[in-house]
Image (spheres, rainbow, N blue to C red):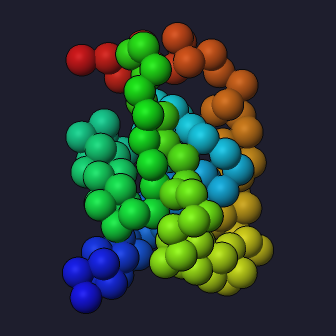
C-alpha cells in the first residue's frame, strides 16, 4: 500500500508530472530541471525527492552535478505509470511547449546554466 500512496502523491502535482515528462527524453541535470520548471532549487529538490521516493526516478552524481533519469523499466509500477502518462500527455500543449523550451535549455552549457544555482 505504501508504494501506491507514494506514487499517487508523486502524481498529484503538475510540476512533478512535467519533470517526469521531460525525463522521457533522457537524463537531465538538476539545473536543467530547475530552469525548465522556473522554480527555486529547493522546491525542485523537494519535487524530485518525492519522485525518487515513489520509485519513478533515479539519481546519480557526477562531479558537482546531480542527474535524474526515469526509473528502470524493470520497476513494474514505475513503467506502468510512465506509459500511462506518455499515452495521455504526449500531445498536451503544455508538455509540447515544455519540450520546445527544454531543447533550448539543453543548448546552454552546464557550466553556464548551473553556475546560477551553485550554493
Residue plotted at (62% across, 16% down): 109
| Residue at 29% in and 44% down | 45
Residue 85 seen in render: no
Q: Position of residue 93 (x, y in %)?
A: 70, 70
Question: Residue 89: x, y in percent?
Answer: 66, 76
Q: Is residue 53 left or right of residue 93?
A: left
Question: Horizontal placement of 66 versus 113: left or right?
Answer: left
Expressed as whole percent of the image width and height from the top left, the position of residue 54 reads: 34, 67
**Up-down: is 43 above or below 10?**
above
Q: Nearer the viewer, residue 91 or 29?
A: 29
Relative placement, left or right, of 105 versus 39 is right
- Residue 12 image-quadrant placement: bottom left
Percent from the top left, x then y, of residue 8? 35, 81
Q: Is residue 26 above or below residue 14?
A: above
Which residue is more in the foreground, 88 or 101? Answer: 88
User: Quick one: which residue is furthest to the bottom in this view?
Assistant: 1
Q: Nearer the viewer, residue 32 or 87?
A: 87
Residue drawn at x 73%, y 39% as measured from the top left? 103
Q: Quadrant of the C terminus?
A: top left
Residue at the image position 44 percent from the left and 34 percent from the top: 60
How many numbered marks does the figure carry? 0
Furthest toward the front, the residue is 74
Amino acid at each position: 500500500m505504501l508504494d501506491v500512496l507514494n506514487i499517487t502523491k508523486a502524481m498529484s502535482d503538475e510540476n512533478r508530472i512535467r519533470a517526469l515528462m521531460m525525463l522521457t527524453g533522457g537524463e537531465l541535470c538538476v539545473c536543467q530541471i530547475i530552469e525548465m520548471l522556473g522554480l527555486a532549487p529547493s522546491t525542485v529538490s523537494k519535487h524530485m525527492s518525492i519522485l525518487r521516493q515513489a520509485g519513478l526516478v533515479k539519481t546519480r552524481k557526477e562531479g558537482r552535478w546531480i542527474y535524474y533519469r526515469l526509473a528502470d523499466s524493470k520497476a513494474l509500477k514505475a513503467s506502468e505509470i510512465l506509459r500511462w502518462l506518455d499515452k495521455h500527455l504526449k500531445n498536451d500543449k503544455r508538455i509540447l511547449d515544455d519540450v520546445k523550451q527544454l531543447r533550448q535549455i539543453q543548448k546552454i552549457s552546464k557550466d553556464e546554466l548551473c553556475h546560477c544555482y551553485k550554493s
